[in-house]
Amino acid sequence: MAPRKNDDAPEDEALQRVGRHLSTPGRIFQPVRRLRTKPVQGRSGGPGAAAPGDDGGPPGRAEPSVGEGRGGGGEERVAALRRFAAAARRHRALHLAGCAALLAVALTAGSIALGAARDNTGQHVAPASAAVSPGLLTTGDLDTGIASLQSHLRDQPRDFGSWSTLGLAYVEQARTKGDPSRYPQAEQAFKRSLALSPDNDQALAGRAALAAARHDFEDALKYADQALKVNPYSERALCTRVDALVELGRYADAAKAADTADDRRPGIPVFTRYAYVRELRGDVRTAERVLRQALSSAISPGDLAYVATQLGQLAWNQGDYDTALTHYARALAADENYLPALEGRARAQAASGDRAGALKGLKDVVARYPLPGPLVELGELYESAGDKVKADDQYALVDAWTALARANGVNADLDTALAAADHGDRKSALRAARAEWDRRQTVHTADALAWALHVNGKDEEALPYARKATATGYRNAAFLYHRGVIEHATGDAEDARKHLAAALKLNPGFSPLGARQARTALKDLEAAK
């Protein structure tokens, strides 16, 4: 099907387009390739990583997990993070340099080196035929698959396809475990694959996914385009291309890329990206209906958990907490350990007044995967209850994660800007936000820069960026709140009231601290009339 010429086609046309693929008799949907890279901020409003996270990710709109991996790994990582975060508070001047190095050592103790025999820790090793299949990334235990690939590559070191699959597995392991120390290993695997076969599209698409996971979206787009020249139907490259264009703020191009992907490789990975592009343009109804149709086509537990979570996040963004909780329950019925659903459920519980449930859920999430988004959310829950000591512990862990991410080639400026603006060094928040805006001009970076400027007392400079953040029609209560506060600071009381009221009407529990501050500011504005 040729791409649509009109990017703003009516909802019915958009639904018919995707619906044709969803309802095609006998169509076998491709398994989800779990390499979604959108930062967490885009869905939740809190800082996070794309993948890791994304998002991000984004923290976030993360893809389904493909395996739990080593038992106890999450607890060990959190313990390491807490030790070094505590040391950082005592020795703040040495924090970034020391934390990055020490955390890298802590998180890579027993790490999976290329071809290292010591990774066979008693786990069952699948036959080589299973190890070399990219489909292994969507089913079964990821660590077992990695061990199988390593065993196979020791015997067949010139198998470029298996080197590529190993690289993808490392990217996935970094994302699902919140451990960016895997990214250099992924890079080496892709280099081996391309050295053996320079034009193999799987390694090029994998390189694109790796670049996106590191928030290097220009390179992600470059490698995706290279992969598509070799194989125009590469699902991973098509999807990463959409992701990269979204994260570069090229929303019209992203919409066209989503149409192209829908024409060439219709399936759940494409449909969810298609829906998100529509959501960014303010078309929530189409986004929801496409996701519901995608959910009706999902069969595997991973796909069910993933799409149900996207519906939950969409509902949460609109302040519909009951519906969000219903979707998260469906996701967790399919996969009780699916991290984005656990995090989303905790956020919805916090927003609907179930503070105990939210605390329990978020503590469980960060105990396994200490990523910025849930760490900030947990910290704000503690802070809103007056427990500043526990809150500061969580914010310090964000600093520790950011140091580790940077040490492994991940651009963490957006995460730094969002977290530090409210809970850290405001000047560093502004430096990070400016740097990120220079790289990519999205609604999320516009919002982060506006807020960083505001907390540094530069409200006149902040206002145009706050307006840019809300210009596409994307319905995000945090963006509206930030704009209203900045308008208040610049003396525009009328617009400040309008946007603060809109934020609270859209999603009255969008943030444990932000929602409370929005209500206070709105009350002050009303009293001053």
Image: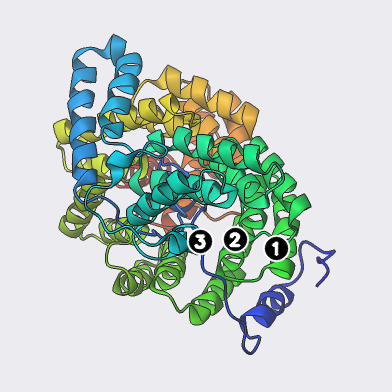
Q: Amino acid at mark 1?
A: Ala
First of labels 3, 2 by sequence position: 3
Please report the residue visible at 51 percent of the width from the left and 53 percent of the height from the top. 35
Please report the residue visible at 64 percent of the width from the left and 37 percent of the height from the top. 195
Nearer the observer, 70 or 219: 70
Nearer to us: label 2 or label 1:
1
Question: What's the CA distance linking mark 1 and mark 3?
Answer: 23 Å
Question: What's the CA distance linking mark 2 and mark 1?
Answer: 10 Å
Q: Residue furthest top?
A: 93
Q: Residues within 10 Å of mark 2 (few under 14, many from 20)?
A: many
Q: Residues within 10 Å of mark 3 (few under 14, many from 20)?
A: some
Q: Residues within 10 Å of mark 1 (few under 14, many from 20)?
A: many
Kindly identify which residue carries mark 1. Answer: 261
First of labels 2, 1 by sequence position: 1
* Percent of width and height locating residue 105: 29, 26
* Percent of width and height locating residue 172: 44, 49
Q: Amino acid at mark 3?
A: Ser
Task: State whether residue 27 appears in this view.
Answer: yes
Kindly identify which residue carries mark 2. Answer: 273
Nearer the observer, 278 or 519: 278
For the residues labelled 2 and 1, say whether their Cβ atoms are less than 8 Å apart.
yes
Kindly identify which residue carries mark 3. Answer: 133
First of labels 1, 3 by sequence position: 3
Please report the residue visible at 41 percent of the width from the left and 31 percent of the height from the top. 405
* Viewport quadrant of the C terminus: top left
Q: Is residue 436 left or right of residue 394?
A: right
Question: What's the CA distance linking mark 3 and mark 2?
Answer: 25 Å
Please report the residue visible at 69 percent of the width from the left and 82 percent of the height from the top. 20
